[in-house]
Image (tube, rainbow, N blue to C red):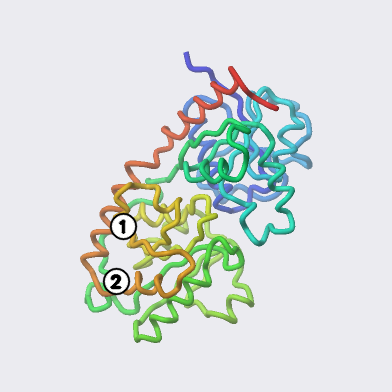
């Protein structure tokens, strides 16, 4: 008989962020399978999330529980690992969503990040490429390690009607809308590379409108380099779903340290033709790699060439759109991820748990 667990995820903030969305989606999927799940956070406001989620706001993530007795505590970022261990519950797990030790913006904290990851407690990741990075950077066998996969809301991010993206086709009004999502300030997102590629194509005469979305307001640094036609920040998931349906082509220029890239898979779910960097997380969805136009990372010329292919070839856009929807609907199911989480928790509770 399946055991019902009490599970607590630890977040520094419950504010709108892709990594927080992943936590809430896992919590929702586990609740649907009969578990009680609480998210404990210090800051933020979770009301942007479109579904019910139990969030408890506290002054200190490591403070004792008063009316909840978790079987499992999940640290969701390297900064929450020490608090999770202080709570001394039967099982402490570290959810890994990316390779923070590789990111320049965390350069001054690299040693602390590596120390947090090196704690010999079980790790769960959102994809097997992260398992490979963890095993390559830390001692093999230092901690139990499992990939549980990712959840995509295919109801909210449902397929849109097919729309031509070729510049010479009368089905779509000029200009062509290019959607670029992510923080300009985050090196791993590679946003400047995408904007440079758009500038190249505009210089060739392509009529392009750029829609930018970020969790941050438009910065002076980005504005000085490139002025987007439309700029949104802090959009809710429901609002993002509408933006995907307004765009013609999606561009994701992320670097290999990217843990998953939620906007990429959400765009695919809506059937938006996509140019994506050929990084492990992007290539992991299917062995055929025929669900997006893949280009080398860090190369604006290659990215511009990929965009040019879609702008010039309506049939390619339509084929990518159909294949993208098929791949996402077959792969990213909430109940499958929740079942994997259950299995990990049960196995580790019965065997190796905390350090």
**Residue in view at x 70 percent, y 25 percent:** 89
Which residue is the site of mark 2? 309
Quarter of the image where one finds residue 138: top right
16 sits to left or right of 65: left
Circle 1 SS class: loop
Which residue is the site of mark 1? 160
**Residue in view at x 56 percent, y 51 percent:** 48
**Which quarter of the rendering shows the C terminus?**
top right
**Residue in view at x 42 percent, y 81 percent:** 200
x, y percentage for residue 116?
70, 42
First in sequence: mark 1 vs mark 2: 1
Circle 2 SS class: helix
**Residue in view at x 53 percent, y 50 percent:** 259
Q: Are marks 1 and 2 in contact (CB under 8 Å)?
A: no
Query: From mark 1 to mark 2, how far is it between C-alphas?
Result: 21 Å
Circle 2 residues within 10 Å: few <14, some 14–19, many ≥20: some
Circle 1 residues within 10 Å: few <14, some 14–19, many ≥20: some
| Residue reaching furthest to the top | 1
- The mark closer to the camera, 1 or 2, is 2
152 sits to left or right of 163: right
């Amino acid at each position: 008989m399946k055991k019902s667990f009490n599970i607590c995820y630890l977040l520094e903030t419950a504010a709108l962020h892709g990594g927080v969305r992943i936590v809430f989606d896992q919590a929702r999927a586990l609740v649907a399978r009969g578990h009680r799940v609480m998210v404990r956070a210090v800051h933020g406001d979770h009301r942007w999330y479109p579904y019910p989620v139990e969030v408890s706001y506290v002054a200190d993530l490591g403070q004792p529980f008063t009316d909840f007795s978790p079987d499992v505590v999940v640290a969701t970022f390297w900064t929450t690992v020490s608090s999770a261990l202080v709570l001394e519950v039967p099982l402490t797990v570290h959810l890994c969503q990316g390779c923070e030790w590789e990111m320049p913006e965390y350069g001054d904290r690299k040693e602390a990040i590596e120390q947090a990851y090196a704690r010999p407690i079980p790790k769960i990741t959102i994809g097997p490429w992260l398992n490979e990075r963890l095993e390559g950077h830390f001692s093999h066998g230092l901690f139990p390690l499992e990939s549980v996969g990712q959840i995509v809301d295919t109801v909210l991010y449902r397929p849109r009607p097919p729309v031509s993206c070729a510049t010479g086709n009368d089905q779509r009004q000029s200009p062509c809308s290019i959607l670029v999502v992510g923080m300009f300030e985050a090196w791993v997102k590679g946003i400047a590379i995408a904007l440079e590629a758009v500038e190249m194509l505009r210089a060739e005469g392509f009529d392009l409108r750029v829609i930018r979305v970020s969790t941050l307001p438009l910065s002076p640094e980005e504005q000085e380099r490139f002025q987007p036609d439309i700029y949104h920040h802090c959009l809710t998931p429901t609002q993002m779903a509408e933006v995907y349906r307004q765009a013609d082509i999606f561009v994701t220029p992320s670097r290999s340290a990217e843990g998953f890239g939620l906007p990429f898979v959400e765009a695919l779910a809506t059937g938006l033709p996509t140019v994506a960097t050929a990084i492990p997380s992007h290539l992991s969805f299917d062995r055929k790699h025929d669900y997006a136009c893949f280009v080398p990372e860090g190369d604006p010329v290659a990215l511009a060439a990929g965009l040019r292919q879609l702008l010039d070839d309506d049939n390619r856009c339509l084929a990518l759109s159909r294949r993208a929807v098929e791949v996402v609907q077959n792969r990213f199911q909430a109940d499958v991820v929740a079942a994997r989480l259950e299995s990990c928790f049960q196995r580790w509770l019965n065997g190796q748990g905390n350090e």
